[in-house]
Image (tube, rainbow, N blue to C red):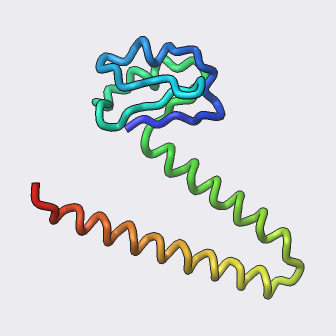
């Protein structure tokens, strides 16, 4: 499903007008895609003049880049290599814990009776 990079969105509303199922609203001057209505047709991605609407796989790349940027910023607070290694190990433990939570949640969602 497409997602909106709110930093890039310029509030032109072209995506809102182009969406065939009215799945995009403007919230606080930025486009917001309603996941429950979106049919993943990609028209909003094509019409966006500033490329603020991106595909799912691009959110993964963006998220990784953001996490690495944050990690490097936090590492700059430490002087010794040993301390930096401890911080990286701690961050990796936190991410593994989050990963287990996500995988467990996905597994349980498959078993919900509708």
Instruction: Give the quarter of the image for residue 17.
Output: top left
Side (left or right) of 65 relative to 111? right
The residue positioned farthest toward the bottom in the image shown? 82
Above or below, 91 against 22 in this view is below
Above or below, 27 against 74 in this view is above
Instruction: Give the quarter of the image for residue 21.
Output: top left
Above or below, 59 against 35 in this view is below
| Quarter occupied by the N terminus | top left
The residue positioned farthest toward the front in the image shown? 28
Residue 40 position, x and y percent, is 32, 31
Tally of numbered tags: 0
Residue depicted at 41% across the width and 24% down the height: 24
Q: Nearer the viewer, residue 59 or 12?
A: 12
Residue 49 position, x and y percent, is 57, 17
Residue 82 position, x and y percent, is 79, 87
Instruction: Give the quarter of the image for residue 51.
Output: top right
Residue 55 position, x and y percent, is 44, 37
Side (left or right) of 72 relative to 51? right
Residue depicted at 32% across the width and 31% down the height: 38
The residue positioned farthest toward the left in the image shown? 114
Residue depicted at 34% across the width and 69% down the height: 103
Residue depicted at 46% across the width and 18% down the height: 15
| Quarter occupied by the C terminus | bottom left
Above or below, 4 against 114 in this view is above
């Amino acid at each position: 499903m497409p997602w909106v990079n709110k930093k890039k969105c310029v509030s032109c509303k072209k995506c809102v007008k182009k969406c065939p199922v009215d799945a995009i609203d403007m919230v606080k001057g930025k486009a917001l895609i309603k996941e429950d209505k979106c049919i993943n047709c990609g028209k909003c991605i094509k019409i966006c003049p500033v490329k603020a609407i991106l595909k799912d796989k691009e959110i993964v790349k963006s998220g990784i880049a953001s996490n690495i940027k944050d990690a490097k910023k936090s590492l700059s607070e430490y002087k010794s290599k040993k301390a930096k290694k401890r911080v990286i190990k701690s961050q990796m433990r936190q991410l593994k814990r989050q990963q287990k939570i996500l995988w467990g949640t996905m597994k349980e969602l498959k078993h919900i009776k509708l």
